Image (tube, helix red, strand yellow):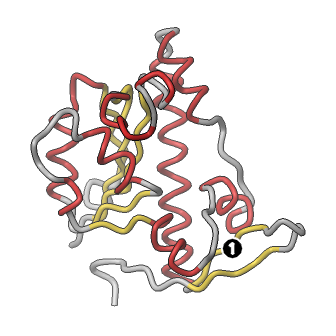
Amino acid sequence: MSNIVYFDLETQKSAEEVGGWGHIREMRMSVGVTYSTAAGGYRIHGEAQVDELIRELQRADLVVGFNHVRFDYEVLHYYTVLDLRQLPALDMMLDLQKALPHRLSLDSLAAATLGVEKTAEGMQAIRWFREGRLLDIAEYCCYDVKITRLIHEYGVRHRQVFYTDRQGRRVAVPVEWPMPGIS
């Protein structure tokens, strides 16, 4: 049985606080969440458990996320000398950028493909971190991981996902996303 690990994390600091987007790893992880198809469940990792999170990603047959290769992995590079970009990965945002002349948000895909919206956004998670509300961050991050998983599964099954364009039209984007263990 294959192990697909869906993954997302939230940070302690904003890009502005660390001197810009060139210093992503300095943003530090507040909470990271995974969903493993082999385990059939979610795992929540605080900063103290970042080594466990990295080991779980290393054991995956495929890591699926949204902007995780350029952003989330770079945040994790603060904690490890390993180049996480070498892991087998499907970054849905990067894959969709190949087909479109613009960048899509996870929220726009979720709304058009699944009819659901995200529950918060990254800056809210940073405020929650400052307030010590780690459970709120974990809940938000779990929901993002679930949305990521459902969009991936939809794309595998239907070979397309949707977004809403500037004119309010629902537009299909063809995808050929892998699902290890399913032929």
Disc 1 element? strand
Q: Which residue is mark 1?
A: 162
Vertical position of residue 156 compared to residue 22: above or below: below
Measured as percent of width and height from the top left, residue 85 is found at 23, 59
Residue at 50% x, 64% y: name it.
Answer: 93
Measured as percent of width and height from the top left, residue 102 is found at 64, 68
149 or 73, which lies in front? 73
Q: Horizontal placement of 172 versus 157: left or right?
A: right
Residue at 74% x, 66% y: name it.
Answer: 112
Vertical position of residue 18 compared to residue 173: above or below: above
Measured as percent of width and height from the top left, residue 55 is found at 14, 46
Find the residue positioned furthest to the left: 81
Vertical position of residue 75 compared to residue 123: above or below: below
If the image is split into quadrants, where does the C terminus sit?
A: bottom left
Find the residue positioned furthest to the bottom: 183
Measured as percent of width and height from the top left, residue 178 is found at 37, 80
Residue at 84% x, 65% y: name it.
Answer: 166
Q: Horizontal placement of 178 versus 124: left or right?
A: left
Residue at 23% x, 68% y: name it.
Answer: 88
Find the residue positioned furthest to the top: 131
If the image is split into quadrants, where does the N terminus sit?
A: bottom left
Q: Horizontal placement of 183 versus 95: left or right?
A: left
